[in-house]
Image (spheres, helix red, strand yellow):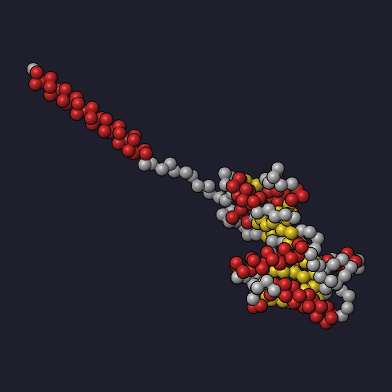
């Protein structure tokens, strides 16, 4: 009888040990090593509804992206928001998208801090996996004499004069452009433009002279000559009327484009 009791107690002890091991294996050992699976967002921080309302959709990645964009702010510059319009759309829907994206930067940035523009893109659904659904952002100079866009910059001459503007903002622009070109090893095209005063040949020569003057700014900052292309359009591509002094000033310009 005594042996039977001892055997039963030993058997119960084994059962207790077995259940204890099972609990430890299934809870402590198992779950300490399990990495919780986090669902990765299907799209980037910002996408648009593919409809005519221009609605913007963001996910949990947007706040960090917004912080990153704002951190690039420089004194005197504005944030260019370049919103897309897709196949079978016109640019009016892109402006609605740009306005809706602009609201996402409130209250950190005001409307005065922003420049809204648009660009043609591909099919809306197919573009959803591109970064920011084909929306581009860039801090740009807009001080009157220097007007930056996403892929080019216009630099104007003095009001009522053919003299090149030479001030701190222009020096800063060329300093920064030279650093960018050294880092990326990209080439640039500098295009000279004129107003309509004078003959075609004269203006072509004058436009090239202006482009060559701007080339010198970059050569003096260590950019190799073979990275700089100069051209002249003379008076053939006005962006304003030549019938006013203000319009003539806008047409006397140099455009700088970074080549891909």
Quarter of the picture holding the C terminus:
bottom right
Q: Residue at x 61, y 45 (%)?
A: 63
**Residue 19: quarter of image:** top left
Percent of width and height locating residue 170: 76, 65
Residue 133 appears in the picture as rendered: yes
Q: Residue at x 50, y 47 (%)?
A: 40
**Residue 78: quarter of image:** bottom right
30 left or right of 169 in image: left
**Residue 222: quarter of image:** bottom right
* Front one among 50 and 199: 199
227 left or right of 20 in image: right
Percent of width and height locating residue 178: 66, 68
* Front one among 44 and 223: 223
131 left or right of 157 in image: left
106 to 119, vertically: above or below: above
Badge count: 0
* Front one among 222 and 64: 222
Residue 95 appears in the picture as rendered: no
Q: Residue furthest bottom?
A: 201
Q: Residue at x 70, y 43 (%)?
A: 107
Quarter of the picture holding the N terminus:
top left
Q: Residue at x 79, y 59 (%)?
A: 143
Percent of width and height locating residue 147: 76, 62
* Front one among 43 and 212: 212
172 to 40, vertically: above or below: below
Percent of width and height locating residue 115: 74, 54
16 to 43, vertically: above or below: above
């Amino acid at each position: 009888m005594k042996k039977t009791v001892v055997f039963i107690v030993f058997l119960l002890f084994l059962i207790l040990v077995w259940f204890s091991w099972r609990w430890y294996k299934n809870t402590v050992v198992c779950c300490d090593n399990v990495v919780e699976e986090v669902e990765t967002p299907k799209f980037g921080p910002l996408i648009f509804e593919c409809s005519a309302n221009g609605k913007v959709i963001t996910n949990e990645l947007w706040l960090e992206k917004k912080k990153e964009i704002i951190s690039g702010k420089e004194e005197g510059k504005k944030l260019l928001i370049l919103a897309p319009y897709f196949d079978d759309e016109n640019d009016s829907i892109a402006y609605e998208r740009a306005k809706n994206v602009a609201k996402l930067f409130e209250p950190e940035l005001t409307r005065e801090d922003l420049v809204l523009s648009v660009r043609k893109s591909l099919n809306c659904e197919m573009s959803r996996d591109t970064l920011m659904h084909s929306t581009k952002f860039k801090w740009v100079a807009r001080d009157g004499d220097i007007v930056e866009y996403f892929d080019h910059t216009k630099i104007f001459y003095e009001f009522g004069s053919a003299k090149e503007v030479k001030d701190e903002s222009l020096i800063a622009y060329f300093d920064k452009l030279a650093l960018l070109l050294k880092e990326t090893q990209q080439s640039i095209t500098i295009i000279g433009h004129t107003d309509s005063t004078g003959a075609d040949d004269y203006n072509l020569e004058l436009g090239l002279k202006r482009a060559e003057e701007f080339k010198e700014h970059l050569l003096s900052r260590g950019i190799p000559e073979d990275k700089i292309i100069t051209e002249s359009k003379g008076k053939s591509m006005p962006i304003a009327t030549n019938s006013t002094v203000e319009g003539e000033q806008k047409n006397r310009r140099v455009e700088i484009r970074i080549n891909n």
